[in-house]
Image: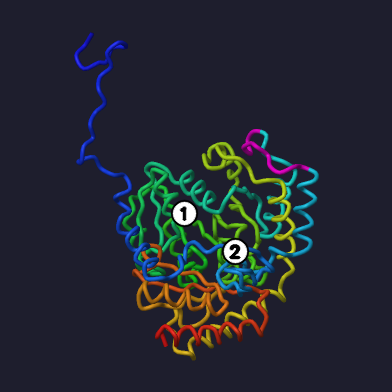
């Protein structure tokens, strides 16, 4: 028997890791300490709130109290639409709770084809493919279409799912300064002749709620022979004459090769998708690993999504009301003296910049005690290491509720010393 190999009758003793073994959790120690410091100060965990009951798209019971919701991304308020709910109930009765399979095996029901048809009709495009989450949509599409020898040029403020899609693939990743058209142009100009190029942009950037100059950026990308993917997660359903997003609003939708979106914002359920006019797009169903190797969405989810998407085609009045909500709240917060992420309202997201994490967490709790829930966003997820109170308005917020929200912000801001 070779030296060092254990025999059945005399096994080798286990290695003694001793004190030098690395704790795999040690890399998280700074975050663990930061969170514990917040809890030790007596503040509620801003990342562990439990909603005991949801009453409507804009209200829920939190800590035993009815609370206005201003941090749900439920932009069009479709979660409680009666027709949407009824479609989900029918699908549960007719098809059961889940598919227990991948789309390429037993996981394609009639509802999956119907929601993809609804997406094609909504965007006026030839192809649509639905994923189990929006995160998987970016992960799958980006990692599959840009491979070894290709280049991905992307905005430095891109969503984590975009970055993870780049990491999962083998392409070279070339970031550029946020919304900087000239920087993007220079990066594209340095890519070797003949290489495959994909430019990845977002319509609305979720942290500050600012929009991209898509028309100019797409023109630059096409001049360099690049394909363009635009993530419209935070604009689909709301921005644009038909709710197709920033690309539609800026008149350049036909120049986009791939639109990525999600069902977990304006559509009001869960899931992700990509729509495209590329003639070879259907091959993605066989080569995209996050599509092939995961279970498909439950029948009730695709039924609610298809119903919601078709209703969003005719939601002009709701879009107009949401814009009024955004403009009124942005102006009101600015008048109160809060520092905001954008000079003017650009989307349904309004980011209120906090001096630091400690006061941001204190402001978050003060608002919750007033009866208002918002998102606390902290580094490293935020640009420039900012701490933000991120507010997302809904078409179902009434004019009176927006007024109440401003009163709550004023009271909490004075109590914490932000204003």
Q: Position of residue 159 (x, y in %)?
A: 45, 59
Q: Which residue is at a point 34% across and 70% down the rendered structure image?
A: 384
Q: Where is residue 180 shown, x and y percent of the image?
A: 38, 69
- Which of labels 1 and 2 is toward the front? 2
The residue lying toward the viewer, choosing from 203 and 16, is: 16
Q: Quadrant of the C terminus?
A: bottom left
- Seen as rendered, the residue at the extreme top is 1
- Which residue is found at the position 61% from the left and 69% from the top? 64
Region in magenta: 95-105
* Main SS category, magenta section: loop
Q: Which residue is mark 2?
A: 51
Q: Nearer the viewer, residue 358 or 135?
A: 358
Task: Report helix, strand or loop for mark 1.
Answer: helix
Classed neighbour count for the residue bearing mark 2: other residues with Cα under 10 Å, few (<14), some (14–19), many (≥20): some
Choose between 110 and 36: the one closer to the eye: 36
Looking at this view, is 150 or 97 the one in front?
A: 97
Mark-to-mark CA distance, 1 and 2: 26 Å
**Callout 2: SS:** strand
Q: Is residue 113 left or right of residue 151?
A: right
First-in-chain label (1 vs 2): 2
Q: Where, by quadrant of the figure, is residue 399 drawn?
A: bottom right
| Residue that appears at 63% across and 64% down | 266
- Is 374 situated above or below 333? above
Q: Which residue lies under the disc numbered 1?
A: 161
């Amino acid at each position: 028997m070779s030296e060092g190999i254990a025999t059945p009758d005399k096994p080798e003793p286990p290695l003694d890791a001793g004190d030098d073994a690395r704790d795999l959790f040690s890399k998280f120690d700074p975050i663990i300490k930061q969170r514990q410091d917040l809890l030790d100060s007596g503040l509620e965990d801003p990342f562990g709130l439990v909603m005991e009951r949801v009453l409507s798209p804009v209200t829920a019971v939190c800590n035993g109290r009815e609370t206005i919701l201003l941090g749900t991304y439920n932009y069009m308020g479709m979660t409680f639409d009666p027709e949407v709910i009824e479609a989900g109930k029918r699908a549960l009765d007719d098809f059961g709770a889940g598919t227990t399979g991948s789309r390429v095996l037993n996981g394609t029901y009639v509802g999956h084809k119907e929601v993809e048809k609804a997406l094609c009709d909504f965007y006026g495009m030839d192809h649509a493919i639905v994923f189990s989450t929006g995160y998987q949509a970016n992960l799958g599409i980006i990692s599959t279409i840009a491979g070894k020898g290709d280049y991905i040029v992307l905005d430095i403020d891109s969503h984590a799912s975009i970055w993870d899609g780049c990491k999962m693939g083998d392409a070279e990743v070339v970031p550029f300064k946020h919304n900087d058209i000239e920087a993007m142009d220079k990066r594209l100009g340095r890519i070797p002749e003949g290489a495959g190029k994909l430019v990845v942009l977002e319509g609305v950037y979720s942290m500050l709620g600012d929009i991209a100059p898509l028309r100019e950026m797409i023109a630059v990308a096409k001049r360099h022979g690049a394909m363009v993917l635009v993530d419209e997660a935070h604009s689909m359903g709301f921005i644009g004459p038909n709710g197709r997003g920033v690309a539609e609003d800026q008149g350049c939708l036909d120049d986009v090769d791939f639109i990525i979106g999600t069902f977990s914002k304006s559509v009001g359920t869960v899931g992700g998708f990509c729509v495209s006019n590329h003639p070879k797009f259907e091959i993605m169903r066989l080569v995209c690993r996050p599509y092939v190797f995961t279970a498909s969405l439950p029948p009730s989810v695709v039924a609610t999504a298809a119903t919601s998407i078709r209703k969003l085609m005719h939601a002009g009045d709701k879009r107009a009301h949401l814009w009024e909500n955004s403009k009124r709240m942005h102006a009101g917060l600015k008048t109160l003296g809060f520092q905001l992420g954008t000079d003017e309202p650009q989307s349904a997201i309004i980011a209120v910049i906090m001096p630091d994490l400690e006061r941001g967490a204190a402001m978050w709790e003060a608002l919750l005690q007033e009866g208002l829930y918002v998102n606390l966003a902290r580094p490293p997820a935020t640009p420039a290491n900012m701490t933000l109170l991120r507010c997302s308005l809904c078409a179902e917020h009434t004019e009176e509720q927006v007024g109440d929200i401003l009163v709550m912000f004023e009271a909490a801001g004075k109590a914490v010393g932000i204003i």
